[in-house]
Image (spheres, helix red, strand yellow):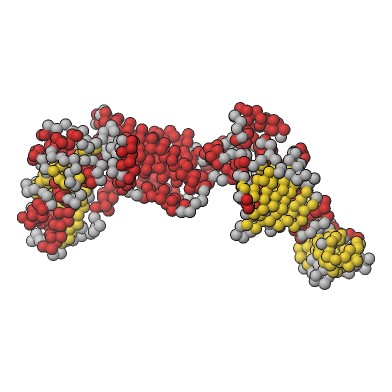
């Protein structure tokens, strides 16, 4: 009996600690909770206060842009972002991190959140991302498709992260048996290795190639269509600013937002 | 000069007295500090998927990663010893212009985010790096994405711990022993080897253990410089991180293995190497 | 007398300079005596090669070891010099035997050979049964002898001893001093001993070189120095009242106008010395034959062995030694005014 109690207390302490740490790390604003009460009290769902958005790292450029536009369209609203790996974000949301919106880079990571009943309703897929072969500027190894990757040093994402899972699907579809030199922890790692010239090619998202167009060229390949990655978004059940969250999710699915996202290399769902 | 150990009963009596006199102003923060360090580990143990553990650990990848971790951490410690002890000696026993600056440089990897360290290593030893290009063309040697690359990345991050520890021991050791050796006909190298090294052996041992522990837990520089490939460059911390992406329970299981092994090794070494002087 | 050691040690440092000529014959034991900071240790380190000379030279058995002007500097490890350090600096991780064998190993002997050569040295010091002991378990006196054996085992042509007895307690010191004296007497090459203790210097050395502020102030045999000190420092060391003045016949006039009368006839610059025991103290002006009489004030009292040392100030500051009984009878206390008298026959005057 006493063991059980002790264990519960210890777990609570650990969780509290973890939540505290994530909270500290997540937003510089930190005042996200306060305006929420007034927001939910008013009957008209007009967004106000601070909306805290946890979003996949690949969304950083476009969401930062969209956040500003959303703020301009809704005076009095402030959007703060926490960009990171989708899995890590999902786990901190489940762990109690204070977030209003979650935009993930894969349905699998979103599932972590929905399984924990931390989302409101069904998540909506708002964009899709496909793979491209990233090569150094000028494509010195003349890579034209997946088959060409067998003869060169290639970096893939690890299969545990979405870009790695997509790469496995695409390679299987192409019937290419590839031994990479490294399985990177995230897509930026795979991209950096190309940028530094340590590998000759890597499989990354189109959006990443586009964002790094100064140093990287992208090579499209037909099998990419078999490995499309859906990006779901949802407002969170424990959102302190429920109205703001709903408004932001709606805005991301608007035509305005889609235009920005398409420019960044995403595809419409 | 002559220090003789007090007889055992006297010593235990003294220890008992000391225990009674610990002031609360020290005891309280000490216990809080202990709790702060230990509770996260307790959390791991509490959340560990004990029933699924045998299955999690039956995967050969786990043992591959563990073996690679132990080998590369030990090799990185060896590299740190071979290069770091002479460096510590240089810093502690000689004067040259810019010594303070060099000393600051040596400790830089302590404050540098390891990922940045990994990128820096790539810029120097990578395929297109200043030295790496030459290594490649002259010897056909490439370090990134290889096990030696893991060792280098770990040594880069771990060596400062050894250097700092050994330098401290050297500074505390009386340099006049080296002078005494010189008057007996010992060259500086002989004096270092036969007098200084044995004198600072506890400091070297402590530094080596610190460096080994740091190398064992190294993540950022390793994944950046050496990448991640099972059996070749995937050490335990990398395996843990990736498992965390998909299966937190597996990550906890892996962490437990890493913890158990390192605690066993460190506790085993402590008595032999770190016997308090 | 052949000269084995011929040195002019000049070392310039920011706040200090050493300028010390030093010669010694084979078998001679020379003590460098001086107060703390006089430059004794600097001289010793320079001789050992642990500190480079700024100027001057160092020649040992005819070989030039150091000559800065000619760019000659033999490093410490190549000098035929043995050093016994003040706190011995025995290597704590080596046994007594391996400490003694250390120098032999550095000179190319194999381990077994070096130990075989080292053992007789420990035997000579009476330490054969402590051969396996670590320095930490040796007594101070034993450690000192191991250090001496270690320095002698490499058969140095110059043996340097830095305050060899300073680390010992008074009782051990007596024994070790006697033993050291015997070993030094057997030593065929030059030994230089650094000490601030006049007794050590006088017992152990054939010749004393007294240094103050990096300069030689006096040198000579122990008896010369103790009879005719030339500085206040030496006078204090050997326990004499010392005054410098100008002599004419039996009268020596001091710079401040005071006079001293001596039994010796002398003229020109002169020193006058007398022991504190030669001073008698009186409550009233004595009417006896003493011509050296001064009214003085007691500045302090101190027990020295079985004597009371009285420090007096006034026209001629001096120290007087009395029996405790005499001191009690005079009812001495700081501030008390007394008359001090010294018989001319008990003073000693010599040219300055």
Horizontal arrangement in the rendering, residue C114 relative to residue A78 (left or right): right
- Front residue of this view, candidates C91 and B272: C91
Which residue is pictured at 17% across the width and 60% down the height?
A78
| Placement of A139 over or under C295, stated as above or below | above
Give the quarter of the image for residue C293: bottom right
Where residue C316 appears, as percent x and y from the top left, is 81, 67
Label total for image: 0
Residue B228, quarter of picture: top left
Determine if residue B243 is in view. no
Q: Quadrant of the N terminus of chain B?
A: top right
Q: Position of residue B85 (x, y in %)?
A: 46, 41
Relative horizontal placement of residue C44, taking residue C324 as reference (left or right): left
Q: What is the x, y in percent for residue C101? A: 63, 33
- Residue at 10% from the left image edge and 34% from the top image edge: A173
Going 17% across and 58% down the picture, which residue do you hit?
A79
Quarter location, residue B249? top left
Relative horizontal placement of residue A106, taking residue B157 as reference (left or right)? left
From the viewer's side, name the closer residue of C266 and C194. Answer: C266
Name the spot of residue C246 as percent of width and height, x first: 84, 67
Kindly identify the residue that appears in the image at 77 percent across and 53 percent down: C219
- Residue A152 at least partly seen: yes
Viewer-proximal residue, A95 or B74?
B74
């Amino acid at each position: 009996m006493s063991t059980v109690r002790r264990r519960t207390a210890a777990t609570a302490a650990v969780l509290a600690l973890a939540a505290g740490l994530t909270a500290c790390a997540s937003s510089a604003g930190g005042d996200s909770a306060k305006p929420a009460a007034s927001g939910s009290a008013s009957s008209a769902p007009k967004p106000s206060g601070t909306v805290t958005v946890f979003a996949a790292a690949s969304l950083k450029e476009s969401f930062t842009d969209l956040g500003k536009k959303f703020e301009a369209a809704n005076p009095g609203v402030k959007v703060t972002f926490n960009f990171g790996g989708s899995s890590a974000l999902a786990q901190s949301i489940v762990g109690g991190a204070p977030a209003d919106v979650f935009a993930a880079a894969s349905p699998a990571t979103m599932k972590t959140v929905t399984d924990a009943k931390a989302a409101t309703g069904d998540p909506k897929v708002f964009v899709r991302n496909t793979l491209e072969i990233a090569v150094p500027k000028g494509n010195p190894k003349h890579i034209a498709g997946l088959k060409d990757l067998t003869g060169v040093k290639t970096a893939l994402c690890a299969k545990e992260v979405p870009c790695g899972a997509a790469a496995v699907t695409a390679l299987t579809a192409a019937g290419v048996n590839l031994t990479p030199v490294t399985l990177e922890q995230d897509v930026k790692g795979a991209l950096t290795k190309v940028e530094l010239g340590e590998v000759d090619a890597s499989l990354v998202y189109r959006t990443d190639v586009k964002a790094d167009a100064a140093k990287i060229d992208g090579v499209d390949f037909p099998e990419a269509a078999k490995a499309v990655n859906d990006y779901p978004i949802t407002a969170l059940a424990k959102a302190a600013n429920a109205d703001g969250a709903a408004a932001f999710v709606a805005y991301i699915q608007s035509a305005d937002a889609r235009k920005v996202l398409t420019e960044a290399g995403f595809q419409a769902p | 000069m002559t220090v003789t150990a007090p007889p055992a009963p006297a010593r235990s009596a003294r220890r008992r007295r000391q225990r009674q006199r610990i002031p609360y102003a020290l005891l309280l923060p000490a216990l809080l500090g202990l709790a702060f360090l230990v509770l996260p580990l307790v959390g791991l143990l509490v959340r560990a998927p004990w029933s699924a553990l045998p299955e999690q650990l039956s995967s050969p990848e786990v043992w591959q990663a563990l073996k690679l971790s132990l080998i590369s951490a030990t090799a990185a410690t060896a590299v740190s010893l071979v290069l770091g002890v002479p460096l510590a000696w240089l810093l502690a026993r000689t004067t040259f212009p810019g010594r303070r600056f060099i000393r600051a440089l040596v400790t830089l990897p302590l404050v540098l985010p390891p990922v940045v360290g990994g990128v820096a290593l790539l810029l120097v030893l990578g395929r297109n790096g200043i030295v790496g290009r030459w290594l490649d063309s002259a010897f056909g040697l490439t370090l990134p994405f290889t096990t030696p690359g893991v060792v280098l990345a770990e040594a880069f991050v771990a060596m400062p711990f050894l250097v700092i520890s050994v330098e401290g021991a050297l500074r505390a050791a009386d340099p006049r022993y080296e002078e005494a050796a010189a008057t007996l006909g010992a060259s500086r190298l002989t004096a270092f080897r036969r007098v200084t090294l044995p004198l600072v052996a506890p400091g070297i041992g402590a530094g080596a253990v610190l460096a080994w522990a740091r190398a064992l837990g190294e993540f950022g520089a390793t994944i950046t410089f050496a990448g991640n490939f099972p059996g070749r460059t995937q050490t335990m911390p990398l395996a843990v991180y990736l498992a965390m992406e998909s299966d937190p329970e597996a990550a906890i299981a892996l962490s437990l293995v890493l913890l158990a092994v390192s605690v066993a090794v460190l506790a085993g070494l402590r008595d032999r190497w770190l016997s308090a002087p | 007398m052949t000269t084995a050691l011929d040195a002019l040690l000049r070392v310039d440092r920011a706040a200090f300079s050493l300028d010390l000529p030093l010669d010694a014959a084979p078998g001679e034991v020379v003590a460098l005596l001086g107060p703390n900071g006089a430059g004794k240790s600097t001289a010793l380190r320079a001789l050992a090669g642990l500190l480079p000379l700024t100027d001057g030279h160092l020649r040992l058995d005819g070989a030039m070891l150091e000559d800065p002007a000619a760019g000659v500097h033999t490093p410490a490890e190549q000098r035929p010099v043995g050093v016994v350090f003040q706190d011995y600096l025995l290597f704590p991780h080596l046994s007594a035997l391996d400490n003694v064998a250390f120098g032999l190993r550095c000179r190319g002997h194999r381990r077994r050979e070096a130990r075989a050569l080292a053992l007789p040295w420990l035997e000579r010091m009476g330490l054969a049964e402590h051969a396996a002991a670590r320095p930490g378990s040796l007594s101070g006196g034993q450690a000192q002898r191991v250090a001496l054996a270690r320095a002698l085992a490499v058969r140095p042509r110059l043996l340097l001893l830095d305050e060899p007895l300073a680390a010992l307690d008074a009782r051990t010191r007596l024994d070790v001093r006697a033993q050291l004296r015997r070993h030094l007497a057997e030593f065929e090459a030059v030994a230089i001993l650094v000490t601030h203790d006049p007794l050590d210097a006088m017992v152990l050395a054939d010749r004393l070189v007294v240094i103050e502020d990096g300069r030689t102030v006096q040198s000579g045999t122990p008896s010369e120095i103790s009879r005719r000190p030339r500085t206040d420092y030496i006078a204090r060391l050997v326990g004499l009242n010392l005054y410098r003045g100008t002599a004419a016949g039996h009268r020596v006039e001091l710079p401040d106008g005071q006079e001293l009368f001596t039994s010796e006839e002398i003229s020109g610059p002169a020193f006058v010395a007398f022991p504190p025991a030669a001073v008698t103290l009186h409550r009233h002006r004595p009417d006896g034959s003493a011509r050296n009489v001064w009214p003085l004030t007691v500045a302090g009292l101190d027990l020295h062995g079985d004597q009371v040392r009285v420090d007096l100030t006034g026209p001629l500051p001096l120290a007087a030694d009395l029996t405790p009984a005499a001191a009690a009878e005079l009812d001495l206390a700081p501030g008390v005014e007394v008359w001090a008298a010294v018989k001319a026959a008990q003073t000693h005057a010599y040219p300055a």
